[in-house]
Image (cartoon, coloured by chain):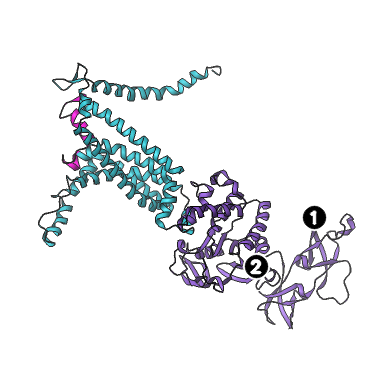
Chain colours: A cyan, B purple
Amino acid sequence: MSTQNPSTRLFGLMFPGAFWLIVFFFLPITLILGISFMTKGGSGSPEFPLTVENYSRVFGEEYLTLFGRSLWISLLSTILTVIIAFPVTIWIVRLPKKWRDLAVFLVMIPFWTNFLLRTYALRFMLLNEGPVMRAINGVWVDSLGFEDPIELLFTQFSVMLGLVYGNLPFMILPLYASLEKFDWTLLEAASDLGANVMNSFMRVMLPLTAPGVIAGSILVFVPAIGNYVTVELMGGGKSQMIGRTIAQQFSTANHWPFGAALSLMMMIVVTAAALIYFRVGRGEKVR
Amino acid sequence: MAQPQADFAVELRDVVKQFGDVAAVDHVSMAIRQKEFFSMLGPSGCGKTTCLRMIAGFEQPTKGDLRINGLSMGNVPAFQRNVNTVFQSYALFPHLTVAQNVGFGLEMKRVATDEIKRRVKEALELVRLPQLADRHPKQMSGGQQQRVALARALVNRPQVLLLDEPLGALDLKLRKEMQIELKNLQTQVGITFIYVTHDQEEALTMSDRICVMSRGKALQIGSPLEIYERPNCRFVADFIGETNFLDGKVMRIDGEFAEIEVAGRKFVGRVGEGARVGDNATMSIRPEKMLLVDKPTPGALNTYETRVASIAYVGSDTRVIVRLGDIQLDVWEQNSQSTLDPSYFFKPGEAAWLTFKPENALVIKD
């Protein structure tokens, strides 16, 4: 066997990965690409003739606005996630060893419960008929004398809350990996050299933990843009995002070709956004 | 910074630092003079680094008053203190170049860009590294990183420079070179240096004054000569250099001298701190201050017949262990004569007369 051609051996190593990619990535993408140029059939399944009409609809004002909105909401949720995750992760990293492991474990515990179930639970928390909001509105209306009860569910706020809540662990874990390696004497050095807390963070800690922030942001931003469960359950139709629109095209609207075109467009937008982000992040690191 | 200079650059007044139940610094007072090279010396865990960190502002004293240039530092955070630190691990910013590292402090003080450039260049010339301005810390040797850390601190022209075992990570030869360089640098820039080390030779070489610490207490503060020649307690005598202890009882004090009886033999030495007639005390006598001779001088004090237990030739001197009854003593004989003649050395088992001058021995309270 020792005389085996190296390139044959290399092929052997590559085969499982290549097989996986072809069957589960290239083939479906090609299929979607194909469908996106077809016409909506009577029963909803794609039919010939080929057309570019789906794409001219995608580039129409309505859907470009939707893309912009989705990008903005995802970006905002990513920024909020970073802002919340940073202090939490710093706190976790600075805990004594045994408590630190427990804290990381607690961050991961929500993964043991179905995401849908957790979103329903969150929805129940914000529901005006639920015990939490009933208590809050009890104080708000009866004691403080406001006329209208607070409504949180089915608002921009509830969608954002759902996105941030669901994605927080994906930010905390990569950030934890970065912060665990962080040399804390560098912060002492910064303050020794006259840097206040803000400068120490911006000039020393953030650049050095950038890989974690970038990884976490990608993990949060990309699923947020395609998310439809949270948008559906927490937004209740009042907050539309591109992921939900795509899902509707494949289900209720029964327009597979248009859904396929939107999907591909979303892939391109997400990839472009991620590339720009990586570029900027890397530039920031070297300065 | 043309502030009026107080008498002392840094003052600790009865400072206590408690970590949980442990007092890392236990009622320490010291006054460090302007432009002084001051060392805090002691074994690890003696509280020297905690003292330094309190001066830097990284730790707050539990009790007591800490003053820099006469001003109480009660609520002044680290970033507002006019002191800079050279860290043991250097703590250079790995994402910044050498020039950016050195310029960091000036940038924080919003010094103009042109001036930053000029002062960074000056600082790098001071530590003889001007050619490495664009490197990153990882691309440099330990010795070079050490110099960058020094430049990064000195460029801010602090009132006091704090150095936390800065030479600890360097190899012996480089360390010796840096000791001399640091001392020269300190004279050149005229800044108060507070230097923390566990290496007594380093402290003796560089310092104007040394504070010997142990278990959170400042045991003795004095010049290298005072610390070595007149230690005020057993710990200081033991920690600085090598010494022999002869434990006994003070029999008589006569002016500057005291007589101590050790296992039936009488020795005479200078009276040290706290020695009282009738008390248990110890005599400290350094190995290099004793002589071994073939024949005793008649009537000389501190002269006893001993037996040679072992000898070790170490080049510049010969280290002999002799036995005087149950007592074992280290004696270092300087090889100032030709050592090529084998009869020059004592042999194990031979008799030798041990003698030392009373002024070279010190009787201290046990």
Q: Is B178 left or right of A283, judged from the image as shown?
A: right
Q: Which mark is residue B315?
A: 1
| Residue ranking furthest to the front | B114
Magenta residue span: A232-257
Q: Which mark is residue A174?
A: none
Q: Secondary structure at mark 2?
A: loop
What is the x, y in percent for residue B93? 50, 50
Residue under numbered circle 2: B208
Q: Of residues A51 and B271, which is closer to you in this image?
A: A51
In the image, what residue occupies the spot 67% across and 66% down?
A: B238
Q: Of residues B308 and A246, which is closer to you in this image?
A: A246
Q: Is A13 left or right of B190, judged from the image as shown?
A: left
Q: Is residue B237 magenta?
A: no
Q: Is A237 left or right of B18, judged from the image as shown?
A: left
Q: Secondary structure at mark 1?
A: loop
In the image, what residue occupies the spot 40% across and 23% down?
A: A18
The chain under label 1 reads B
- Which of disc 1 and disc 2 is earlier in sequence? 2
Amino acid type for the residue under numbered disc 2: Asp
What is the x, y in percent for residue B118? 54, 53
Q: Of residues B128 and A1, which is closer to you in this image?
A: B128
The quadrant holding residue B349 is bottom right
Residue B56, compared with residue A248, is above or below; it is below
Q: Separation of disc 2 and disc 1 at Cα? A: 30 Å
The chain under label 2 reads B
